[in-house]
């Protein structure tokens, strides 16, 4: 099985990726949070700088519904030596969708078709796609599949949920199966994969996935890795998790200005990582209440000294 790290806005930035790669690894491709500015912001540029992605197979992601903007961003990306970019057609965020970007672009399939025709004709880079299966109804998927089949998609990453479903409810595996039957391109599964144990057949495990999608050999993981950073490497050492956390924190302190922005980053991560600890609500509450770095470090020390850490697979 090949594993990809999903792009998660504000979390899986280069500081997270390189620290994760150092302590855990096991990822075949790292996808960056989306780039949306035709003139890359300093944050977007820093995220894809080769010196910030040493030793990693990194794929920059683009979010736009304008072909000219996509091509301009792709040109900037190619200048840094990248050979592949990823098109975001999966983000379900209301603010993104309202502008007909991300999953919102799926609501206007004729325009999406014209957009894809232009970028695949003119872009010098290989283009992979990450998509949802529609906006409101499962019936939209057939039309979208017919559009995608027309283009030389480098790799097709499918999160088999509708935009309106967000991240709730079980995924529609029959939609992924339909893509397997219809498309002649490499496919990657994405959605609710949180456990690599082949001994488990519970929802979100490798046993569950291979039972329903036996031909699947590539999986993109997002929340599962954030909840349990050691899941791919099989490294569930508490000392490794602590070292990973501490170096990640120091990286943000070095990169960002002031405690507020750094604390925001780390608190956001803890909403996921807290799942590696049992009965830990009181510790999470203290982390969230921290208003400066001293308070934050005291709260983090408390959870790491507690006996609430649980080893998961």
Image (tube, helix red, strand yellow):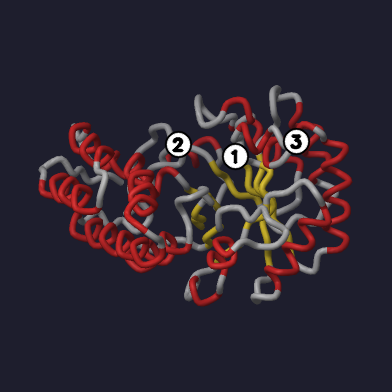
Say which mark, if any, is on residue 106.
3
Residue located at (51% from left, 57% from top): 2
Measure the alpha-carbon separation of dots 2 and 3: 29 Å
Of pointers 1 and 3, the one earlier in the residue sequence: 3
Residue 152 position by quadrant: bottom right
* SS at badge 1: loop
The residue singled out by tag 2 in the image is 208
On the picture, is 152 further left or further right than 290? right
Please state which of the two labelled residues, at mark 2 or mark 3, is closer to the viewer: 3
Q: Is residue 231 above or below residue 204?
A: below
On the picture, is 220 further left or further right than 68? left
Say which mark, if any, is on residue 275.
none
The residue singled out by tag 1 in the image is 159
295 or 147, which lies in front?
A: 295
Please state which of the two labelled residues, at mark 1 or mark 3, is closer to the viewer: 3
On the picture, is 100 further left or further right than 236? right
40 or 269, which lies in front?
A: 40
* SS at badge 2: helix
Residue located at (82% from left, 53% from top): 67
Q: Is residue 100 above or below residue 74?
A: above
Residue 70 position by quadrant: bottom right
Please state which of the two labelled residues, at mark 2 or mark 1, is closer to the viewer: 1
């Amino acid at each position: 099985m090949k594993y990809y790290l999903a792009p998660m806005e504000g979390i899986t930035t280069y500081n997270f990726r390189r620290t994760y790669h150092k302590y855990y690894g096991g990822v075949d491709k790292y996808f960056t949070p989306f780039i949306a500015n035709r003139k890359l912001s300093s944050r977007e540029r820093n995220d894809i700088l080769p010196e910030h992605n040493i030793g990693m197979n990194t794929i920059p992601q683009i979010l736009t519904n304008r072909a000219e903007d996509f091509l301009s961003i792709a040109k900037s990306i190619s200048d840094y030596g990248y050979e592949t970019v990823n098109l975001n057609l999966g983000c379900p965020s209301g603010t993104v969708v309202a502008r007909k970007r991300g999953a919102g672009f799926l609501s206007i399939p004729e325009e999406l078709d014209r957009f894809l025709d232009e970028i695949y004709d003119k872009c010098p880079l290989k283009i992979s796609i990450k998509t949802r299966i529609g906006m409101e109804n499962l019936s939209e998927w057939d039309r979208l599949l017919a559009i995608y089949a027309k283009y030389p998609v480098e790799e097709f990453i499918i999160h088999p949920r509708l935009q309106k479903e967000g991240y709730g409810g079980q995924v529609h595996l029959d939609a992924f199966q339909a893509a397997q039957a219809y498309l002649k391109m490499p496919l990657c599964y994405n959605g609710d994969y949180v456990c690599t144990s082949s001994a488990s057949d519970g929802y979100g495990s490798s046993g569950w996935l291979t039972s329903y999608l036996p031909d699947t050999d590539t999986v993109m993981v997002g929340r599962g890795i954030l909840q349990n950073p050691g899941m791919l490497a099989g490294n569930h050492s508490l000392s490794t998790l602590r070292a990973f956390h501490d170096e990640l924190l120091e990286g943000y302190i070095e990169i960002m200005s002031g405690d507020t922005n750094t604390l925001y980053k780390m608190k956001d991560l803890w909403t996921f990582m807290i799942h590696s600890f049992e009965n830990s609500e009181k510790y999470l509450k203290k982390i969230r209440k921290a208003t400066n770095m001293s308070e934050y470090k005291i709260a983090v020390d408390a959870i790491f000294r507690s006996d609430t850490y649980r080893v998961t697979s």
